[in-house]
Amino acid sequence: MRLPLVLLLVLLPFPVFAQQQADKEEPAVASSDDPDAAETAPSKVPLDEIRRYVAVYNAVKDAYVEPVDDKKLMHSAIRGLLLDLDPHSTYFDKEDAEAFDEQATGAYDGVGVELLQQPDNTLRVISPIDDTPAAKAGIKAGDVIVAIDGKPISGEDGMEPLRGEPGSKLTLTLLREGKPKPFDVTLTRETIRIASVRSRLLEPGYGYVRISTFQADTGADFQSNLDKLQTSGKLNGLVLDLRSNPGGLLISAVQVADDLLDKGNIVSTRGRIAVSDSKFDATPGDRLQGAPLVVLVDAGSASAAEVLAGALRDNKRARVVGSRTFGKGSVQTVLPLDNGDSVKLTTARYYTPSGKSIQASGIVPDVVLKPEQDTAATSKDPKFVSSTGASIDYSEAALPGHLRGDDEGAEGYSAGEALDGDKPIDAALAELKKMAAAPAAITHR
């Protein structure tokens, strides 16, 4: 799988705006001797810096030990332009852009895992996708892929080796916190068709809906699953499971929130330009008719999943149960280019209805759960540590170059944990029954 659908909140009007600006503005240059040039005239090209780039370009072309193709060198330069912005701003070549489109519709060939490439080229698992080869093999949120088929991961190939013909095999070498050594997992690629919404009755009167990612059809699928649950009788409450949901399309999360809210703000976004500012409010009509609601989250709940959890809690519509969420509170816009490539650029932050940005801090649940102990590891096992000696912190705040959060570094902060299995569902159901028995006693942080 090549792209992290994971952490993508898409605002469609921005590419149109960018093209309009490009059509209106004439090319201009500015000398880098002006210290305020970047602030006062952001659309101007710094001539001195362009000259420096050309000098380095020519040096590489003339003196590098082997010939370098012009296209490859320019491609590297473009990627470098985005490299130091934040972990979610990147350049997509045409194949990457096509792969993103495939994932937005929920069909592609691969192993079914959402990833983020790190500066050392290793791949951090944001979450395995339900019922895919990765999930069936036991790959967990927070795992780090350090090799594919025994070969280190190159910055050039990235996640591409994970994709391939259905039925073909590959071996991943993983590092996992709590495991002292790397270990291998062999997977068979499949055509991944993601059903983003699944549902069932936990027991009479109490429903369960699992949303694994937010795709174009997630809103409609949520409605149909909820309607199906309600045909079995009146629901006294619902558990909404967003564990290891890496996000996806913002509008789909807004649609689900709107189905569960009768009124109130859902989310707002704010950026440097007016087109990045938006606000989404609920329309009348709660499809659960006010029945109690528990949202189950963990460290793999990111982006659009956090938008949904924050909207429901801030509007006092739900209690949040689980572990601190990932803390990805920024909006990415995909800007298509004429040659088929695209630029994914961080353009705004999103804010929950209370006006809180959860960038790099996440959502702290009302009821905190802890993961079950890994039976393959004991308390005497050393935690996996990086080459710098630091233990793995699975959160937005741990990503190099991340946007600084408003509440980042607050006293008592600790990253969340992945919560696997059915026990968290049992805990969420128990909380739901308390709410159904005494709804007036519920409080929210």
Image (tube, helix red, strand yellow):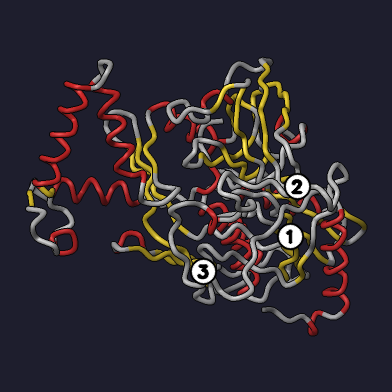
Q: Position of residue 68 (x, y in %)?
A: 26, 19
Q: Would residue 354 be seen by someone viewing this image from the given angle?
A: yes
Of marks 3 and 1, the one in the foreground: 3
| Amino acid type at mark 2 | Gly
Q: Marks 3 and 1, how far apart in space? A: 23 Å
Q: Marks 2 and 3, how far apart in space? A: 26 Å
| Amino acid type at mark 1 | Leu
| Amino acid type at mark 3 | Glu
Q: Secondary structure at mark 3?
A: loop
Residue at image mark 2: 178
Q: Residues within 10 Å of mark 1 (few under 14, many from 20)?
A: many
First in sequence, mark 2 or 3: give its number: 2
Q: Which residue corresponds to the image point at 86% horizontal and 74% vertical from the top-left?
A: 434
Q: Which residue corresponds to the image point at 13% horizontal and 34% vertical from the top-left?
A: 55
Q: Position of residue 113 (x, y in %)?
A: 63, 36
As rendered, which of 419 and 70 lies closer to the eye? 70
Relative to 274, say whether 229 is above or below: above
**Picture mark count:** 3
First in sequence, mark 3 or 1: give its number: 1
Of marks 2 and 3, the one in the foreground: 2
In which quadrant will I find the N terminus? Answer: top right
Q: Which mark is residue 296?
A: 1
Looking at the image, residue 21 sits to the left or right of residue 353; the answer is left
Question: Residue farthest to the right?
Answer: 204
Q: Residues within 10 Å of mark 2 (few under 14, many from 20)?
A: many
Residue at image mark 3: 408
Q: Secondary structure at mark 2?
A: loop
Q: Marks 1 and 2, how far apart in space? A: 24 Å
